[in-house]
Image: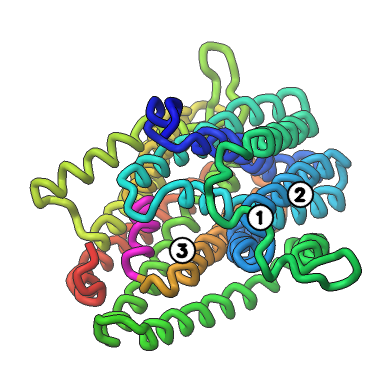
Amino acid sequence: MTEMQVKQGHPNGLMTLFFSEMWERVCYYGMRVLLTLYLVKSLMKGDADAALIYGAYTALVYAAPILGGKMADKFLGYRNAVLLGAILMAIGEFLILGGSEHFLMIGMGALIVGNGYFKANISTIVGKLYEDNDPRRDSGFTIFYIGINIGALLATTVIAYVGETYGFKYGFGLAGFGMLLGLIIFWVGRNNYAAAEGLGFTEEGKQKVAGPLNKAHMVGILSLVLIPLCYFLIQQNSWLDYILLGLFVFIAYSLVKAGIDADTKESVKVWKDRMIALIIFMVINITFWACFEQAGTSLTLFADRNVDRSIFGWEMPASMTQFFNPFFIIVFGSIFSVMWVKLSKIGKNPSIPLKFAFGIIQLALGFLITQVGLQFVNEAYQVPLLTLVFLYLLHTTGELFLSPIGLSMVTKLSPKSMAGTAMGAWFLSFAIANYVGGQIAALTGGHSDSGEKMTAAEGLDKYITTFSTIGFVLLGIALLIILLNKPLKKLMHGVE
């Protein structure tokens, strides 16, 4: 072990990957934080159209890593996949600067494909820096997770502010430079993580196809074909209804079949039950994130129109209100991880179904906080900024009950032979959630039933009514999960 490794307590490569991922998140969230407002204010889209485009884009972003991970495993190797992803994401951001809807859609296509390669594989490299039973692994991933949230915090403050104050093109441009910085750090520091396995082209990837081109080269070239496909799916987003539903049914069938076929010491019934439990948790996960992801759509437009964002004479840009979530994650993340350990020691750690239910209750209460804000409306029909502060606080604590627990649960519920498929299924649930989130946001709309643009008073009433309905429905779902706690635990066969 080198002196540097002893001093840090972690492999050298961790900090290289930490900063690469941090800047990639600046790029991704920088684009996302401005997207809805850019669609509505610059491209003059209606609220519903903007929400559906946003939902389709974020759904495809979450679906892409399923393919990106497979291509890296089979052909590209992890380092090459991350490099390809970073280049495509930077190109995507700079294409948006063209200023038209076509440039935006092509840019979004490049960002989707790039994110699929980057996001799926940089975490894999982090995992491969550690031996299988290395006790530092969980701590390493926690440090890496902090990098993700610092990137999100920079995007939702600096890029949100620059984009709304000086012009959207400066925000998108800054996000693109963030990605270039991440790419440079990843490339320059490549020797630091060189010990990780599977970084270069695989044996299959090196097989020649045409002249000097091998299979890995072909994968890179064919990836570019996916960009116009993404363009088409964002524009014709109703196609995603059938594609995502079909994928969910296929994945659910694959999981149950894999559980039945699992070649392990435990009985077929155990693995089949665990796979059924995983599918139920996927549905719960979709419910949570479809509502949570209102942050980028209906909650941002609500902040823009019906929230008093003045702080001592300075008006906070609407997109910047999204910074509360990563800020609270950084504040509470480590507190929660310590809390679970302490609760386990005294035998009071809630079961996984109860953690999911408590997370949904907090999400529901966050939406219902808007009813309290309604009691303090000013003459411009705006609720106080504190309404959003408390809403995002509750949403973030809800997220901490659910998000890290979910990832850990997937690895425990699935047999080792299909860990990748199970994680792909879990990512698919996020893709479906983002798409459904766009559909929910489209219902809040900025237009009345007659098609007229709503007044501030009508808009406020519609937002609060929609958010309250979401809150009450979520409370009902949480109650149902609490009632089903014992049957769900039975299906999990001892997984805690």
Q: How far apart are labels 3 and 2 at the CA level?
A: 28 Å
Q: Nearer the N terminus, badge 3 or badge 2?
A: 2
Label drawn at residue 88? 2
Which residue occupies 55% across, 65% down? 432
Q: How is the image coloured?
A: rainbow
Q: In the picture, residue 264 is in which quadrant? A: bottom left
Q: How far apart are labels 3 and 1 at the CA level?
A: 35 Å
Q: Position of residue 302 (x, y in %)?
A: 56, 40
Q: Position of residue 463 (x, y in %)?
A: 52, 47
> For mark 3, what is the residue?
286
Say which of 404 and 140 sits in front: 140
> For mark 1, what is the residue?
200
Q: Nearer the N terminus, badge 2 or badge 1?
A: 2
Q: Give the SS element for disc 2.
A: helix
Label drawn at residue 290? none
What amino acid type should be assigned to the residue bearing mark 3?
Ile
On the rendered structure, is 194 left or right of 469? right
Q: Give the SS element for disc 1.
A: loop
Which residue occupies 55% across, 20% down? 310
Position of residue 431 relative to residue 40, above or below, is below
Q: Is residue 447 visible?
A: no
Position of residue 292 relative to residue 417, above or below, is above
Q: Position of residue 300 (x, y in %)?
A: 58, 40
| Camera-nearest label, 3 or 2 | 2
In the image, the segment drawn in magenta is: 402-413
What amino acid type should be assigned to the residue bearing mark 1?
Gly
Q: How far apart are labels 2 and 1 at the CA level?
A: 19 Å
**Hey, which residue is sitting farthest left in the picture?**
346
What amino acid type should be assigned to the residue bearing mark 2?
Leu
